[in-house]
Amino acid sequence: MSRPITVVSRSIAANSVVDKHSHSWGQFVYANSGVLMVVTATDRYIVPPEQGVWLLPKVDHEVSTISKVELTSFYFDNNLLDQLPDQCCVLRVNDFLKTLILEANHITSDYLWSGADGLLLRLILNRLSLAPNIIFQLPYPKDSRLLTMLSLIQKEPSNNYKLEQWGKEIGASSRTLSRLFKKETGLSYSTWRQRLNIQIAISQLSKGKSITSISLYLGYESPSAFTYMFKENTGMTPSFYRDKK
C-alpha cells in the first residue's frame, strides 16, 4: 500500500459472495448498513452495524451479504499492527467511531498522511485499538462427529437436543462430545449453541422476520424467552437489530 491506511467503500447487493481470499495487510471490515457474514477457516462472524470484523494479514476469508450492505474496509500497513488485536475478532463500533468511519468514506486515495485526512485515519486507528472485543464469532470444530451434529442443527434449528440425545443420534457418548466441543472450539456445547442461535437470529432479523417467528424457528418456548437470551448475550433487544436491516 502506498499509504499506511487505505479506505475502500462499496455497495454490495443482498446474497452476494466475495470468494475466499487473503491480504498481506490487516483489514477491518465494517457494514455502514446491512448485515455481513465473514467466514475464515476456523470461525464464522455475523456482523450488524454496531460491530466490525478485524482480520489479520494472510488469513483466508470469505465475505457474504445477508442483506444489501454499504461496506467500508480499512487496510492497515503491517507497521501499524502492534496497535491492533493480535487475533481475528469482532470489535464493537460505538456512535463516535461510527461517525468517524462515515466521514472516512469521503477520503480519496491520494490523501496526505500528514494532513487532515491522515489525522482522521489515525484517530480511527486509535479508536479501534480501544474498541472492546465482543462475542459474535462462532468457532467451528473439525471432528466429523461434531460436523454431522452441526449439519443436523443447521437443517433444523428448533432441535434442542442435549448432548445425551445427540450421543445416541451420532454414536458417541455425551462425555466424548462435551470434551470434543471444548477442545475444538474452546466453548461448552451450550455456549456454542447459544452463539449459533444469536447469529441465526441476527440473520433472520435483517430479513425482516418477526421476533415470534424467529423464536419458534429456534425452538424457544416463547418470544419472551428468546428475547431474554438475546439481550443477555448481545446487550440489545432483537428489535434493535431488526431496525438496522
Image (cartoon, grey):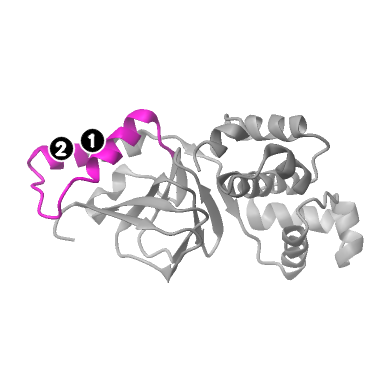
Nearest the viewer among 94 and 3 is 94
Q: Is residue 106 found inside the magenta-colored segment of the image?
A: yes
Instruction: Report how far apart the C-alphas of labels 2 and 1 lie in the structure.
Output: 6 Å
User: Which image quarter holds the N terminus?
Assistant: bottom left
Disc 2 secondary structure class: helix
Q: Where is residue 69 in the image (x, y as percent from the top left)?
A: 42, 52
Q: Where is residue 171 in the image (x, y as percent from the top left)?
A: 88, 67
Residue 13: quarter of image: bottom left
Q: Is residue 212 found inside the magenta-colored segment of the image?
A: no
Residue where numbered disc 1 is placed? 123
Kindly identify the amino acid type of the residue bearing the numbered disc 2: Leu
Instruction: Give left or right: position of 239 versus 220.
Output: left
Q: Residue 119 carries which label?
A: 2
Q: Determine whether 227 is above or below 162 in the image.
A: above
Q: Is residue 173 in view?
A: no
Q: Where is residue 141 in the image (x, y as percent from the top left)?
A: 66, 61
Kindly identify the amino acid type of the residue bearing the numbered disc 1: Leu
Q: Please count the marks in the image.
A: 2
